[in-house]
Image: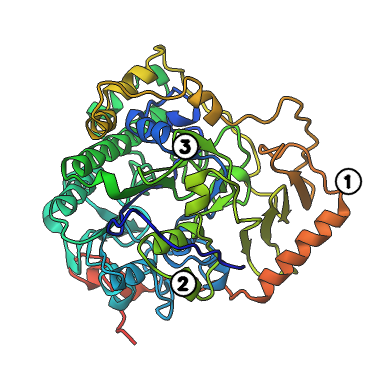
């Protein structure tokens, strides 16, 4: 895929501070900036309304694939990270011969910090964040753990997975992870000395994987008695902690005088899982599908970008964009020469986002897993208009309407106005009142189309959707447009030809915490 490069001119300013808030398993219908008021997210709403809501933004179907895509600017099929996420005690990870974003940014004069979830492999010390370009790391290696003890468990093997750089962080046991991550992010901002890349990868609202999978402080959970469903209420409390955290960190950026030259991104790493063994009660309505699938509900996620450097703000963008694009875009914003990047799939989106003019992206690979088309496989690709899904199992293809009671108050705009983020914006703009387009929530709400017809059958093996007109994947057009199916299949064949098999390996008992002083530490020697 060709890269587009433009000269960078930001009025002789230093390279911007970059902050990326990455929520975990937040579905399309979970934040209120998409028009649903069941779970108000006033801080997110304030930044989304004042920035650019990315309504046509795509990630990968699961944690490790998405994180590897962001860190490298490459589709996971190129690295072997396209399959099931790194599970606890498995000896594999993001290959060491691939340079990742913090390494590039550090070379450009940035200080780089990871707060939260890594989930790109830790069986060798050389795979962990401090050895891969981050000046500091505060968080956990694997995919899920208890929010308070920070212990991760496999069968009867339980140990701590919480670290400050290379050292286990025992003293933070008992404190909620989102609170800890907020405090660490604020500390980094207050002590910043160089252009900042701050990657805040929340644990929430992902399940803990333990006997109490959904955990949130009581004061957050108590805000949502009207939901009337225990799991969804707990989940709402978890979402609320993320919203509060973003507000506090944004407020700290304003207090530090950093907002005028900053780029702030918020996204989920994949869609939600409303039901099933690993459900967090997250919903993707009205989109089809769950996490781990290639349907829209798994891969099209809540996202926005806020920055005073954007020329056209306070809008909803339908510009086609992929998570890999942020690698290339951030590199360009930091002063890097995009044309020097090799083997990346991400495109420099900045001028298009800033000006609100089209998108250089005309194709997007959702995923291919496994690679052998003769085996049971899942694959999907889209161009600007059409999406092809080859799904032998048609797994996780339902559309689940969000459950639980509606909020009995029409107060989401009032909550937005009272939020920390809104107050920080008022101070930044030196105004007493923020003005947003009156219909911004309506424009951010995704609908399935007024004339939507449905012929979807889970027994089909080939699906073609006009994804611009039919984002809910209701009407399979494969029989009507065999020529488009054929063309998109050829593109999938190309990606198969340049792909590498998944790196996933079985769990190694040598990783168990009883062998490492009660921690899930790296256990193999570096090469």
In the rendered image, is residue 87 in sight?
no
Q: Is residue 496 above or below residue 486?
A: below
Residue at point 40%, 47% (across, down): 24
Q: Residues within 10 Å of mark 1 (few under 14, many from 20)?
A: few
Quarter of the image for the N terminus: give it: bottom right
Circle 1/circle 2 CB separation < 8 Å = no
Q: What numbered label is drawn on residue 480?
A: 1
Q: Is residue 524 above or below residue 388?
A: below
Residue 339 is left or right of residue 209, and the answer is right
Which quadrant would residue 500 be assigned to in this image? bottom right
Q: Earlier in the sequence, mark 1 or mark 2?
A: 1
| Neighbourhood count class around disc 2 (C-alpha, 10 Å): few under 14, some 14–19, many 20 upward | few
Depth check: give the residue in front, 396 or 483: 483
Measured as percent of width and height from the top left, residue 412 is found at: 38, 20
Horizontal side, residue 76 vs residue 376: left or right: left
Q: Which residue is painted at 44% across and 41% down in the image?
A: 26
Q: Residue shown at 24%/33% (left/top)?
A: 424
Residue 252 horizontal side relative to residue 300, left or right: left
Q: Which residue is outermost to the left?
A: 171
Question: Residue 491 in the image: x percent, y percent?
Answer: 73, 65
Residue on which disc 2 sits: 506
How crowded pointer 3 is (Cα within 10 Å; few <14, some 14-19, many 20+) is rated as: many
The residue at which mark 3 appears reads as: 282
Label located before the other in sequence (1 or 3): 3
Q: Secondary structure at mark 1?
A: loop
Q: Foreground mark, 1 or 2?
A: 1
Q: CA distance from mark 1 to mark 2?
A: 44 Å
* Cα separation between marks 1 and 3: 35 Å
Residue toward you, 75 or 399: 75
């Amino acid at each position: 895929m060709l890269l587009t490069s433009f000269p960078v001119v930001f009025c002789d300013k230093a390279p911007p501070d970059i902050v990326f808030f990455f929520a975990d398993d937040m579905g399309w219908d979970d934040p209120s900036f998409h028009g649903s008021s069941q779970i108000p997210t006033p801080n997110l709403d304030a930044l989304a309304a004042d920035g650019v809501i990315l309504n046509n933004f795509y990630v990968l179907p699961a944690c490790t694939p998405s994180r590897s895509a962001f860190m490298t600017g490459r589709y996971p099929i190129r690295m072997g990270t396209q399959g099931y996420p790194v599970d606890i005690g498995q000896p594999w990870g993001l290959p060491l011969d691939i340079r990742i974003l913090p390494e590039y940014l550090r070379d450009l004069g940035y200080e780089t910090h990871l707060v939260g979830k890594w989930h790109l492999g830790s069986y060798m010390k050389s795979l962990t964040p401090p050895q891969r370009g981050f000046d500091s790391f505060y968080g956990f290696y694997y995919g899920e753990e208890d929010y308070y003890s920070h212990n991760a468990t496999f069968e009867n093997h339980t140990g701590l997975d919480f670290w400050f750089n290379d050292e286990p962080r025992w003293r933070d046991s008992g404190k909620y992870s989102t609170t800890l991550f907020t405090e660490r992010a604020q500390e980094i901002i207050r002590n910043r000395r160089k252009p900042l890349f701050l990657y805040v990868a929340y644990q929430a609202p992902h399940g803990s994987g333990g006997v109490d999978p959904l955990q949130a402080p009581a004061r957050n959970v108590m805000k949502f008695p009207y939901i009337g469903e225990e799991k969804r209420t707990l989940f709402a409390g978890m979402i609320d902690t993320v919203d509060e955290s973003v507000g506090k960190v944004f407020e700290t950026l304003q207090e530090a005088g950093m907002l005028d030259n900053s780029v702030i991104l918020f996204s989920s790493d994949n869609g939600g899982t409303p039901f099933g063994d690993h459900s967090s009660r997250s919903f993707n309505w009205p989109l089809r599908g769950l996490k781990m699938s290639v349907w829209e509900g798994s891969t099209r996620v809540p996202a926005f970008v806020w920055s005073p450097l954007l020329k056209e703000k306070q809008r909803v963008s339908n510009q086609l964009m992929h998570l890999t694009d942020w690698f290339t875009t951030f590199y360009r914003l930091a002063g890097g020469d995009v044309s020097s990047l090799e083997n990346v799939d991400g495109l420099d989106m900045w001028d298009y986002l800033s000006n609100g003019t089209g998108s250089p992206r005309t194709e997007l690979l959702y995923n291919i897993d496994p690679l052998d088309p003769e085996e049971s496989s899942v694959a999907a690709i889209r161009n600007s208009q059409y999406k092809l899904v080859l799904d032998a199992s048609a797994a996780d293809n339902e559309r689940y309407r969000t459950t639980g009671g509606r909020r009995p108050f029409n107060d989401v705009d009032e909550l937005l106005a009272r939020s920390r983020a809104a107050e920080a914006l008022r101070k930044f703009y030196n105004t007493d009142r923020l003005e947003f387009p009156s219909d911004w929530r309506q424009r951010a709400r995704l609908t399935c189309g007024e004339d939507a017809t449905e012929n979807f059958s889970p027994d089909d093996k080939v699906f073609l959707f006009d994804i611009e007109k039919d984002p809910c994947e209701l009407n399979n057009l494969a029989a009507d447009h065999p020529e488009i199916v054929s063309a998109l299949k050829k593109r999938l064949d190309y990606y198969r030809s340049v792909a590498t098999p998944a790196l996933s390996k079985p769990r190694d008992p040598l990783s168990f915490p009883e062998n490492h002083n009660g921690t899930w530490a790296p256990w193999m020697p570096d090469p």
